[in-house]
Amino acid sequence: DFVMTQSPDSLAVSLGERATINCKSSQSLLSTSNNKNYLAWYQQKPGQPPKLLISWASTRESGVPDRFSGSGSGTDFTLTISSLQAEDVAVYYCQQYYSSPPNTFGQGTKLEIK
Amino acid sequence: QLQLQESGPGLVKPSETLSLTCTLSGGSISRSSYYWGWIRQPPGKGLDWIGSIHYSGNTYYNASLESRVTISVDTSKNQFSLQLRSVTAADTAVYYCARMSGYSGSGNYYYYMDVWGKGTTVTVSS
């Protein structure tokens, strides 16, 4: 099975500053047939279900603020929040869907305000 | 707008069977584009995919749970269900149902979760 490892486990960033969360896959998530990376990012606020932010490594879901962006290819991916807002406090998960089943999640990164 | 709602007992005794249902509103389960999945989250921990089903009945399961899990679909009720047998305290978790988008082909399955239910807490205890 693919192993997804996120870093850091927790992160504290000042309001208005940039937050960067990394996700590394044990194997490449890039399909050579369509040049797509099979990686999604989710946001989970306390007491709420996860919410899909980004699919295909960089495609933002409708309604997701443009301060959220996804990048990377192959085995290394990044979720960037360009200017942290108070409502962005959450746990963020990456998930691969290139080699599934199983759908494999990272362990999560807890984002807080400094 | 599609909404998913989990339902079922909040307390299950050890060795018994956990049974949950996910009911859709605002959309049909019989859409060929989607799978429908179950995901769980133990207290204070991360997300674990349990399994998924297509309205046609095709299923995928997490190998770690496959011997104890059955996922079924009832298109007439716009529902799908989870049964987890022989539960232990380790099965205590919030259980989520979700719609899964993506595609399948050549025997492979490429789906991510794009709509989630609110989740239901299941505690395994005597």
Image: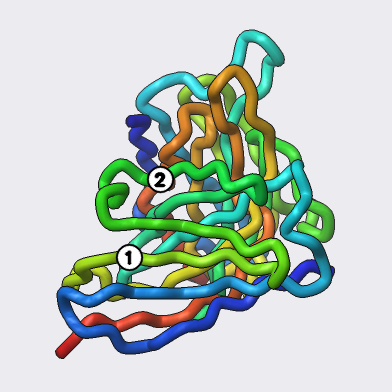
What residue does disc 1 label? B84
- Estimate the x, y position of residue A45 in percent, counting from the top left: 55, 72
- What type is the residue that disc 2 sits on? Tyr
Q: Secondary structure at mark 1?
A: strand
Identify the residue shown where x is 58% and y is 47%.
Answer: B57
What residue does disc 2 label? B61
Q: Residues within 10 Å of mark 1 (few under 14, many from 20)?
A: some
Task: Report the coloring of the rendering.
Answer: rainbow
Label pair 1/2, CB-CB below 8 angstroms: no
Identify the residue shown where x is 42% and y is 32%.
Answer: A24
Report whether residue B76 is seen. Answer: yes
Instruction: Tell me which chain the residue with mark 1 is part of.
Output: B
As drawn, B60 above or below B75: above
The quadrant in which the N terminus of chain A is found is: top left
Q: Secondary structure at mark 2?
A: strand
In the rendered structure, the answer to whether residue B74 lies left or right of residue B3 reads: left
In the rendered structure, the answer to whether residue B108 lies left or right of residue A4 reads: right
Instruction: Tell me which chain the residue with mark 2 is part of.
Output: B
Judged from this view, the residue extending furthest toward the top is A32
Compute the Cα span from label 1 to label 2. Answer: 12 Å
